[in-house]
Amino acid sequence: MTAASPPIDTVMRTLSDPTRRAIYERIVAGSEASVRSLTEFAGVSQPAVSQHLKALLDARLVLGRKEGRNTFYRADPNGLQPLAAWMEEHRRFWDASFDRLDDYLRELQRKKDQP
């Protein structure tokens, strides 16, 4: 995890809200999104969208860029790093567990096949 990465709990908690996750996915799907476009998409009030964006900013999942009175948001490419690292750790654990199970089952079969 890089120094700029938030704790995994923050990322998971932030993305656990369905509306916030939908807003994040909308931002990820495009290059940038304005508060106005996100409000139209989300079907919630502008203050609610702003609160969701603040949470996404605090979790370092998005970055904001001011242009006049508007702010445009884009996904931070490093934002999901804590989650990706956590998932990779668990993938390795389960791969090793299934490899051990496979070895054990082969050994049982070998013993069964012996006269």
Image: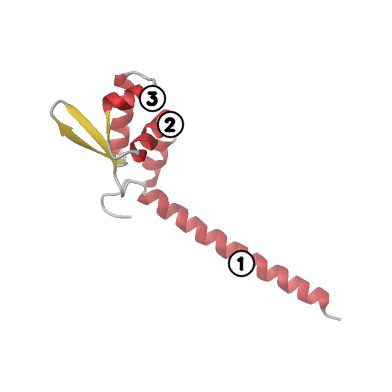
Dot 3: few (<14), some (14–19), or many (≥20) neighbours within 10 Å? some
Identified by mark 3, the residue type is Ala
**How much space separates mark 3 and mark 1, taking CA atoms?**
44 Å
- Residue at the farthest right position: 115
Quadrant housing residue 27: top left
Q: Which residue of the protein is positioned furthest toward the bottom in this rendering?
A: 115
Instruction: Identify which residue is drawn at 79% across, 76% down.
Output: 111
Q: Seen in the image, is 105 located left or right of residue 78?
A: right
- Which corner quadrant of the image does residue 14 belong to? top left
Q: Which of the two marks, 3 or 1, is nearer to us in this view?
A: 3
Q: Identify the mark at residue 99; answer none if there is no mark.
A: 1
Above or below: residue 40 compared with residue 86? above
- Tell me the amino acid under the disc marked 1: Asp
Residue 48, image x, y percentages: 33, 22
Name the residue beneath numbered marker 2.
17
- Which quadrant holds the N terminus? bottom left
Look at the numbered discs 2 and 1 and tell me whether their residues touch, using CB distance below 8 Å.
no
In the displayed structure image, the side of residue 33 where residue 100 appears, left or right: right
In the picture provided, is 52 more to the left or to the right than 110?
A: left
Q: Secondary structure at mark 2?
A: loop
Quarter holding the C terminus? Answer: bottom right
Q: Name the spot of residue 3 as percent of width and height, x first.
A: 26, 53
Give the total of numbered labels.
3
Q: Nearer the viewer, residue 100 or 24?
A: 24
* Alpha carbon separation for disc pair 2 and 1: 36 Å
Q: Position of residue 34 (x, y in %)?
A: 26, 29
Q: Amino acid at mark 2?
A: Asp
- For label 3, the residue is 42
Of the numbered discs 2 and 3, the one sitting upstream in the chain is 2
Q: Earlier in the sequence, mark 2 or mark 1?
A: 2
First reached walking from the N terminus: tag 3 or tag 1:
3
- Packing grade of label 2 (10 A; few <14, some 14-19, many >=20) is few
